[in-house]
Amino acid sequence: MQFIAKESTAIRTNLGAIFVSLELSRSTWLITSVSPGGGEKMSKHCLSAGDIAALLARFSALKQRAFARTGKLFPIIVVQEAGLDGLATCFGRPNLPG
């Protein structure tokens, strides 16, 4: 009996969505993403904390880039990684303990 090994990668490259991770702090927001048609490369961008317009522009650019690569529109799935700094920023409470 002969077995044929298939190559596998750590990150799936046939994505059905744009996956975004937000790491929020009081001074900066780190945005990482993996997009369809982008291979295994994860992109990273930093924004000033609270700059919602820049965040939405980044989402728009990710969608446009994925469309240009694949000819398809994809939803964005966002995961937020926030410690106390990020929660304080989001809820406008800068004096949380920690």
Image: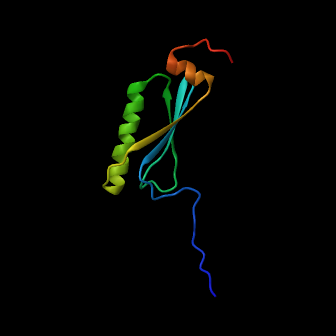
Left or right side of 54 for 26: right
Q: Which x, y percent locates residue 92? A: 51, 15
| Front-lying residue, 1 or 39 | 1
What residue is at 53 percent from the left and 19 percent from the top?
89
Residue 66 to residue 97: above or below = below
Q: Residue at x 62, y 86 (%)?
A: 2
Q: Residue furthest top?
A: 95
Residue pictured at 44% horizontal, 49% vertical? 35
Residue 48 percent location from the top left of the image? 49, 25
Query: Does 80 sit above or below residue 5?
Result: above
61 or 7, nearer to the observer: 7
Tell me, yes or no, if residue 26 can be seen here: no
Up the image or down, 6 lies above or below 69; here it is below
Name the outermost residue toward the front: 1
- Extreme residue in the right direction: 98
40 shown above or below 59: below
